[in-house]
Image (tube, rainbow, N blue to C red):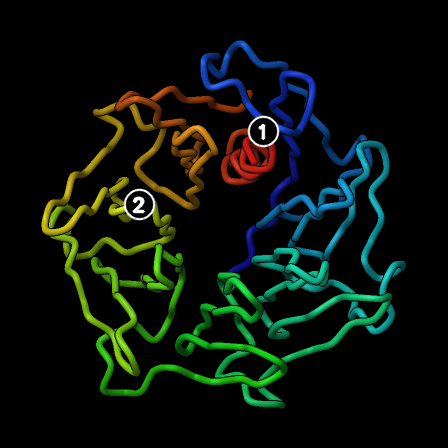
Amino acid sequence: MFRRVLVPVLLLISAGTLAALDSSRTLTQYVHRIWTVQQGLPNGTIYDIWQTQDGFLWLGTQTGLVRFDGVRYTPAETIFSGVPDNLWIRAGFEDERHALWVGTVDAGIFRFQDGRAEQFSARNGMPSDTVLCMVQVPGGGLWACTANGLVHLSDGKIQVSRTREDPAPNIVRAACMAAGGKLWVGGDDPAIYLKNGDGFDAIPLHAIPSDASVRAIACSGDSIWVGTTAGLVKVTGATQHLYTQKDGLVDDGVLSLHEGGDGSLWVGTRSGFSRLRNGEFESFRPRMGYRRAASLRSMKIARVACG
C-alpha cells in the first residue's frame, strides 16, 4: 500500500473547552490553534483521534499511538509494555472498561490496558492484519473492517462474518451501527450493505457514478450518511440525495463523518472539513501549506470537541 508522507497538523477548534461546540456559531467564530512538528507533534499522518474519559487525547498516527495532554505528546511505547515501534494506526476508541483499542494497517488489532498490550492478528484468526475501521458494540466487543472481510471480536474470540457468497466487498472500509444493533458497511464499490444474520443485503447507491466507492458511513436515526469518492449521500429508506461541492461541500472526496450532539454532521474531506447544519453547509479550509495534511485530521479534532 502506498504511504503518504505528510506533515501532520493538529487543528483545535474551540470556544474554550473540549466539551462542546456552540451550534449557533459559524466555524469562523472559533479560535483556531495549530500544533505542528515544531510544537512536538509526531511526524506522520494522523488517521484517527479520540478523547478518553480521563481527558487525554489519543492520536492514531502513521508512526504510532500518541497521548496528548494539551502540552506534551507521549508515545504509547512508554506507557504500555509490548507495543511495537512504528505502528501504522487507522482507528481507535476507548471501551466501557477504559481499555484502548486500535486497528492497524499491518499488525491487526491491539488492546491496551493496565500498562499492557494484547494483539489480535492473522496469527490467531484475523482474516487480515489490515484494519481500516472499528465499531464499538454496546456491552462489549467490536466490529472491525479489514482488507479481507468483516470481523466480530468479543471476549478474545474472533469471528469472520462473511463468506465468498456474500455480496459485501472483500475490502471493508467503513461501518456504523444504527438503532437496534443494525450494522451497515461499505467498501470499494458504489453500495452499502446491511448485515442480515449470516449475510448482507446490498443497497446500490444510484446517486453516484459506477466507479465511485465508499469511504465513511454514519448512522443517524432513520438515515444513513455515506461519504464517498464522489460526494456525500443521504440514504433514507428508498430515497437517496447526493451533496457535492455545488451544494457547498468543501470537497467531493469524503474521508470521514461524525454526527454532533446538536444533530449537525461533520464531514472530513481531502481539502478541509464541512459542517452540515439545518440543511446548509459551512466549510473550513486549512491555511495554505497545511491543506492536505489537515483535512481529515482537522475534522477529527472537531469530532472530539462536539462530543
Quadrant in the picture for residue 63? bottom right
Of residue 105 and residue 72, the one placed in the foreground of this image is 72
Amino acid type indicated by mark 1: Tyr
Position of residue 84 in the picture relative to residue 121 (left or right): right
User: Element at badge 1?
Assistant: loop
Question: Which residue does the numbered mark 1 point to in the structure image?
Answer: 290
- Up/down of 76 relative to 226, above or below: below
Q: Position of residue 151 (x, y in %)?
A: 46, 77
- Up/down of 22 relative to 214, above or below: above
**Dot 1: within a 10 Å radius of its alpha carbon, few (fewer than 14), some, or many (20 or more) residues?**
many
Of residue 182 and residue 224, the one placed in the foreground of this image is 182
Quadrant in the picture for residue 85? bottom right
Of residue 259 and residue 28, the one placed in the foreground of this image is 259
Quadrant in the picture for residue 13? top right
Rendered image: mark on residue 221: 2
Which of labels 1 and 2 is toward the front?
A: 2
Position of residue 56 in the picture relative to residue 256 (left or right): right
Label tally: 2
Q: Position of residue 301 (x, y in %)?
A: 60, 35
In the picture, the quarter occupied by the C terminus is top right
Q: Position of residue 248 (x, y in %)?
A: 28, 23
Q: Position of residue 74 (x, y in %)?
A: 85, 48
User: Element at badge 2?
Assistant: loop
Position of residue 130 in the picture relative to residue 87 (left or right): left
Amino acid type indicated by mark 2: Gly
Rendered image: mark on residue 25: none
Question: Which residue is painted at 46% across and 72% down in the image?
Answer: 146
Q: Furthest residue to the top?
A: 29
- Up/down of 233 relative to 263, above or below: below
Question: Which residue is painted at 64% across and 80% down in the image?
Answer: 120
